[in-house]
Image: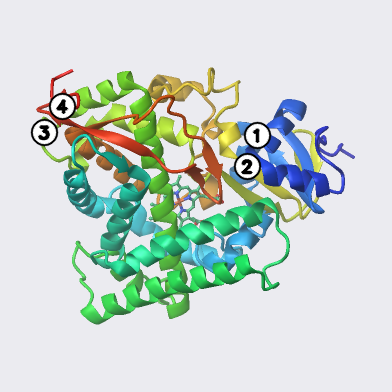
Amino acid sequence: MKPAPPLPRHTSRLGVSSALAFRRNPLGFLGTGVDDCGDVYRFSLLGLPVVLVNHPDYIQHVLVENGENYDKNAVLFRIVRPVLRQGLIGNADIELWRRQRRMMAPHFTPRTVQRFAEFMTEETELTARQWRPGSIVDLTDAIGQLALRIVNRSLFSAAVGPRARAFEEAFGEANTILGRYFRFPFPPLSVPTRAHRRLRSAIARMDDFVATSVRERVEAGARADDRADLLTLLLNSVDDDRAMDAQQLHDEVLNLCIGAYETTTNTLAWAFYLLARHPEVEAAVHAEVDTVLGGRTPEFADLANLPYIRMVVDETLRLYSPAYQFMRRARKPDEIGGHRIPAGTNVLINSYLLHRHPDFWPDAERFDPTRFSPERVAERPKHAYVPFGSGQRVCIGKHFALTELTLVLATIAQHHRFVAPYEPFEISPDPLITLHPKGGVHLRVLPRESGRTADPEGAPR
Ligand code: HEM
């Protein structure tokens, strides 16, 4: 029989002290395990068997080659299921998931997401115009509202009102509570603690947002032309002549809101933070928009001509992947890296660690967008980089997200630059269910004038 994966020295067999260490510092706890044991090891959290895999070959095995053996009945998804229910993200019913994915995938191809590009740039222009030169902007908040407006228009053709703001607050609360809960899954959700009551209230508020938005959109009458919003497309989607029922539609819309809002907000907040700390990268971004756009608002067709900004997006997603960990459960026994994986094992993939693996990412903490030049990408195994996952469960919103991230960065770079409001300027990641910039990203906004960068007094740099 193959040996079990090694157990790092700092973990305990029963998992009580490990669970406490994991709760204090999950990324530190998992990173120490990699330092100690290498690319595959096991640990236990309060009796739950978990195996971390941190090598591109192992990740490819779990997500692609033997993907059928790994489902989403893993503990991480069980924790978020009260929020996401039967929507695509955490759905563990493989037949239902397949049907839903077949119906939804055609609306998320690189070509079909084109229809949303205009919303993305229009809303970004509005946001950028609100920033007063010299002021300090809470970018996490401003970009969060922008992302929500983009989601709202793409899904419901609706403007954002107080209801969307309530969704944002409720999601923030659920993310914090579930993030804590993932670190220490005790007591179970059925016990009526204060945090669980708050979680239930947050879920009810998110449900209310979705239910009311769907109802209003349906009452307003659907557009069936090529400008149709996502909700209309979902309402008209059929598989084997069957449409999705009202509850399934609700769950999918909620999953899309959650999938699209937080991840893009965090990525953009991290991107502006990184640009503020790396003026040489920021200057290259400005040079690209000045050459390609010359002051006009970007369009979908410009994306192919903005390769440097796209590399900035890719490198930001390497350092701070918002969906920084995901899990699978082994349905049948398997073998990874010469180690036995019993059925029922929770297999954890943590892209925060993988994207810093020294064999694939030299000087990993350095922000260097040129890592994503086509030549350097070709030198690396594909699964050394998985910000959107891989295999059959790869993020359905990947092209939507990459379009949005690149267009928002290009649009804002036409108007402003950002600088650190104080020194030393260091923001650490807060590993909730998604990876947050702890305390948010606050930056001083400075204007750009006709393609040149200006300092606060207005003198060109
Ligand atoms: C920077 C932005 C984004 C990142 C980093 C991201 C990341 C991910 C990852 C890693 C997964 C796979 C999780 C797993 O395998 O367990 C995933 C799945 C998913 N994402 Fe995204 N996502 C982003 C944006 C979006 C957007 C914009 C949408 C919707 C428009 C979206 C909707 C979804 C959905 C529905 C799934 C589940 C797919 C399935 O299992 O069939 N995501 N995302």
Q: Amino acid at mark 1?
A: Asn
Q: Which residue is mark 2?
A: 349
Front in this rendered view, residue 207 or 200:
200
- Give the mark nearer the N terminus: 1 vs 3: 1
Secondary structure under the numbered disc 3 in the rendered image = loop
Figure quadrant of residue 317: top left
Residue at 19% x, 62% y is 227
Front in this rendered view, residue 413 or 6:
413
Q: Nearer the viewer, mark 2 or mark 3?
A: 3
In this image, 167 relative to 287: left or right? Answer: right
Secondary structure under the numbered disc 1 in the rendered image = loop
Q: Which residue is mark 1?
A: 54
Q: Which residue is mark 3?
A: 295
Does the residue at mark 3 contact the one at mark 4 (Cβ under 8 Å)? yes
Q: Which residue is mark 4?
A: 290
The N terminus, quarter of image: top right
Is residue 301 in view? yes
Secondary structure under the numbered disc 2 in the rendered image = strand
Does the residue at mark 1 contact the one at mark 3 (Cβ under 8 Å)? no
Q: Nearer the viewer, mark 2 or mark 4?
A: 4
Q: Nearer the viewer, mark 1 or mark 4?
A: 4
Q: Where residue 440 appears, x then y in whole percent? A: 42, 43
How far separated are the C-alphas under marks 1 and 4?
A: 40 Å
